[in-house]
Amino acid sequence: MKLYEFEGAPSPRKVRLFAAEKGLSLPTVSVDLRAGEQFSEWYRQIQPRCTVPALALEDGTVIGDSEAICRYLEAQQPDLPLLGETALEQARIAEWLRRIELAGYGPTADALRNQSPAFADRALPGPDPIEQIPALAERGRWRAQRFWPALDAALAAGGPWLLGDRLSAADLFAFATLEFAQRVELGPDCALPVLASWQQRLRQRSTVQA
């Protein structure tokens, strides 16, 4: 297996965190998004959608979505399950992953890609030119600011992790999303002490520091 990724991007980080918690070491190839390497001919041959991450398997199959990659890795290494053991755990984690994507990561990405000059004509990932819509940036900021307090409240109600006493992929995906949002100045605009404590616990894990 070989993971095509970019260190500064949130979606590949989800996979790196997941693999580290599973004790998996994946050979990686860096695709420089800042230089536009995702649009290069060599990378289009691997991932025509021009996005990262992409996991290339030995038989030539390419999995091009962070959650799908994690599900594949979970099946390959079922020890230390991060996507749930029981049907209920699996359902709750799947629900959280969807919520994080739709209410956290998606709005943050919309806010960034529709306002930053770095994403002019690239308001959506992929090879096609898409113009920015400032109103979507504003809506994305508003939606993201509704998500962080909801995440804080969920942790306060059931913690220390999103699914109770055991770390799961939901924590890793939410953590990668929060850190990305903060890095691009779209993180929480109010004090959320439970969320901050959870983030600090994750930052202290050896798998996150690696």
Image (spheres, rainbow, N blue to C red):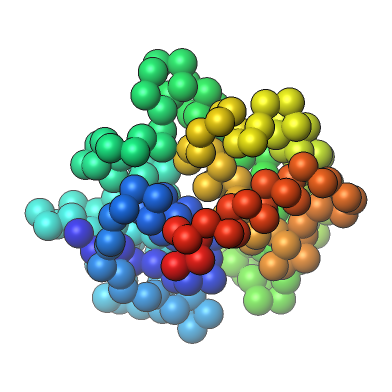
Location of residue 57 in the rendering, given as x and y in whole percent from the top left corner: 18, 55
Question: What residue do we see at 28% from left, 55% from top?
Answer: 24
Question: What residue do we see at 28% from left, 45% from top?
Answer: 73
Instruction: Examine the image and state in which quarter residue 59 appears.
Output: bottom left
Q: How many marks?
A: 0
Q: Is 72 rendered above or below residue 6?
A: above
Location of residue 6 in the rendering, given as x and y in whole percent from the top left corner: 44, 71
- Residue furthest toward the bottom? 35
Residue closest to the eye, 183 or 50: 183
Question: What residue do we see at 30% from left, 69% from top?
Answer: 28
Q: Which of the image's four quarters has the N terminus?
A: bottom left
Location of residue 32 in the rendering, given as x and y in whole percent from the top left corner: 44, 79
In the image, 78: left or right of 96? left
Question: What residue do we see at 26% from left, 36% from top?
Answer: 78
In the image, 116: left or right of 189? left
Q: Which of the image's four quarters has the C terminus?
A: bottom left
Is residue 91 among the parts visible in the rendering?
yes
Q: Is 173 rendered above or below residue 181?
A: above
Is residue 15 among the parts visible in the rendering?
no
Q: Is 1 rendered above or below residue 79?
A: below
Location of residue 174 in the rendering, given as x and y in whole percent from the top left corner: 60, 46
- Residue furthest toward the right? 190
